Amino acid sequence: MPAPLYPTDTEPCIPVLLLNGRHQYLGFRDVLLRAHTIEDLALPLPPAASAVLRLLTVFTARVTGLDDPEMGAGEWAARRRALLKEPDGFDAGAVHAYFDRYTWDLFHPARPFLQDPRLAEQCEKRAGVNKLVFGRPEGDNLAWLSPHSDIDPQPVPTERALWHMLIHHYYGAGGQCSARTVGGRSTSSAKTGPLRSTISFHPLGRTLYETLLAGLPKPNDPWPGTEDRCPWEEPLPDPRAAPPPVTWPGRLLTGRSRHAVLLIPSPDGRHVTDAYLTWATEQTLPAIDPYLIHHVDQKRPVTQRHTPRLADADRALWRDLDTLLLAGDEEAAVQRPEAFTTLNDLPPEVRTSLRARVHAFDQDKMMTLSRTWYTALTPPIWPWVQENDPQAAERIAACRTAAEKVGSLLAKVSKEAWRKATTPASSQNSKPPKRQPAWARRASADYWARAEATFWRLLDDPARDPSAAFTADAVAVLRTATRPAIARQFRTARAVAEAVAELRRRS
């Protein structure tokens, strides 16, 4: 029987939504060739979509020449504008020339795509297909929400195995992993993936072609003089050696994985039956991903100054909108994703329709715990960006800031009201509970739901005071959350009345 094959450049492994409304699976090569006829990616796993967008962005840079580090900013912007006016998308010859140059087969014996064939000899045991697939229980973990078990591991279709492999490369957990022996020394500890527990923001155009070109940033800072390479463009690295400098865009977007993977296929290559999963490097280099919001602490060393904003499934997208719209400066405490800094150079017809796609994975930063992943989409954002309408951007920022201030105060007064209502008079000097009590949890959840509707109304009513509007929301949800308790205990009414007065006084 011939060896199994699964060339990802031609095998239909990436689901897309076409402009005609139909869904279709395409290989990486065809995704690029037909990008101008595709509305958006249709991957059902947001972290996999985030990873695929980064891969496609690098492919875009390679086939268009926009990865030339010697190209000046003006020339680069003009080249991108010219490409965006091409009705037939990417040059087919350039796409074929690039994909013909490298190996894209997931099961290639010497160079499987984004994998390390040496793991078959360097690892004593396999991790198992359940370890590869996010959401499946593995080992002796209980099967709460999945019927899978290591007693009878079920194969996963190869295209889905590719998606989960990408999630491990970008969002993989740190800590204990399968032991890997290199140079006579065995190690079984992996570092967290470069996007672990983060939220990514991607400019979204009318077609995937526009999305890829709009989301390709031109860095302002000079990059190391070493040649930029992606993992599939260079020999397998020495796991014990220091990683090469981070360069743009290949190493930055595709070459910072801390995990090594080797998929074990079924005889026909249609399924993956097992996998090796272990560490890829003992050292990592800091880098600023262009699709993440970063918090900046100027007091810390340069290499530790930027901290990405973490994903939070309880945090609505509109609370990040002002960060995307405000240009900021080098001294700002929060910086918008670098991919949004060059949107002003896009043609007007592209800018006016531009939205932002969000892909996030709410995980524990270090441990293997994963809460949920989610995606979201903004309305067209260009009319509000600071470079286009500074008053609108500042109004959005002021409304968001007021909502955050009132939300924080609501959480505080709710906890204090709970303490007053449930603590005996002899113990009234006790501290508020560390965990949010029932009132605070319900009031907070209801507040942010109401605050979102209020936020959008405030944008249409610039004369209205945002603090007063959000305070009215906070008072309403606090009274609703505490109404059953007030009916049962008179002391609760006084505690809530004091909390309402405090909300109105300090908002």
Image (cartoon, grey):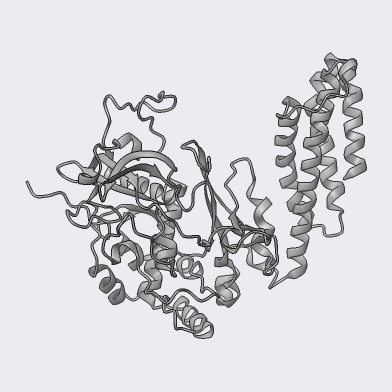
Left or right: 257 in relation to 435: left
Q: Residue at x 28, y 76 (%)?
A: 93
Give the farthest residue toward the front. Answer: 184
Residue 445 locus on image (x, y percent): 70, 35
Residue 283 locus on image (x, y percent): 42, 55
Using the image as rendered, state which of residue 65 and residue 229 is in the foreground. 229
Q: In this orientation, does residue 262 appear?
A: yes
Q: Residue at x 70, y 67 (%)?
A: 331
**Which quadrant of the view contains residue 417?**
top right
Q: Residue at x 83, y 24 (%)?
A: 430
In the displayed structure, would residue 260 be above or below residue 478?
below
Using the image as rendered, state which of residue 504 and residue 347 is in the foreground. 504
Residue 328 locus on image (x, y percent): 69, 67
Left or right: 398 in relation to 338: right
**Which quadrant of the view contains residue 151?**
top left
Left or right: 309 in relation to 404: left
